[in-house]
Image: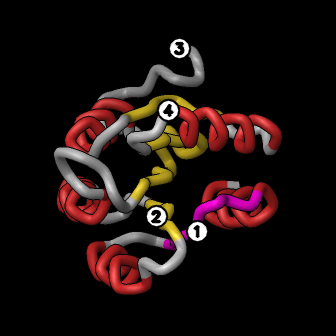
């Protein structure tokens, strides 16, 4: 069994799921995480995909964009938390979205980070949550 093959229901505690509708943002986040020796095990470009991928991959952490088509990051967070109350989710938000950040925390987000994402801030938050 390799690092990404799990028994049914088992969490990949070190794996990260990236969720953002912008490919350029997913690439940037993936590059930052690679510098910190973190494994991105999946990507999604909207909230619907995020929930499906979460159930399939059971990552240790989700980096979730707050504003996306089809299903927002807030609604996706709620759905993931219903499926797995212990899910760790860092919400990525643009400056000036304080109201949405409060909604995200109420929905179950563990933490948040503002865009543009600063490399050290992201790596520090990921390290605190999943090592």
Q: Does the magenta segment cover residue 73?
A: no
Q: Earlier in the sequence, mark 2 or mark 3?
A: 3
Q: Earlier in the sequence, mark 1 or mark 2?
A: 2
Question: Does the rendering let one see residue 11?
Answer: no
Residue 97 in the image, given as x and y percentages of width and height: 42, 78
Left or right of residue 66: residue 13: right
In terms of depth relative to the viewer, which is nearer, 130 or 41? 41
Q: CA distance from mark 3 to mark 1?
A: 34 Å
In this figure, which colouring scheme has been used for the structure?
A: secondary structure
- Identify the image quadrant of residue 66: bottom left
Q: Quadrant of the C terminus?
A: bottom right
Q: CA distance from mark 4 to mark 1?
A: 18 Å
Instruction: Find disc 3 in the rendering and name its residue.
Output: 1
In terms of depth relative to the viewer, which is nearer, 62 or 118? 118
Give yes or no for contact between labels 1 and 2 (Cβ–Cβ under 8 Å): yes
Q: CA distance from mark 2 to mark 3?
A: 31 Å
Stretch in magenta: 111-118
Give the answer, above or below, for where 40 lies relative to 94: above
């Amino acid at each position: 069994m390799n690092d990404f093959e799990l028994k049914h229901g088992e969490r990949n505690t070190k794996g990260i799921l990236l969720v953002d509708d912008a490919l350029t943002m997913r690439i940037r986040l993936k590059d930052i995480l690679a510098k910190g020796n973190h494994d991105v095990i999946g990507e999604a470009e909207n909230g619907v995909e995020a929930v499906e991928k979460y159930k399939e991959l059971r990552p240790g952490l989700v980096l979730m964009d707050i504003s996306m088509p089809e299903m927002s990051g807030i609604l996706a967070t709620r759905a993931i938390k219903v499926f797995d109350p212990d899910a760790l989710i860092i919400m990525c938000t643009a400056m000036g979205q304080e109201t949405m950040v409060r909604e995200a925390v109420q929905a179950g987000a563990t933490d948040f980070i503002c865009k543009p994402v600063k490399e050290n801030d992201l790596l520090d938050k990921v390290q605190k949550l999943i090592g």
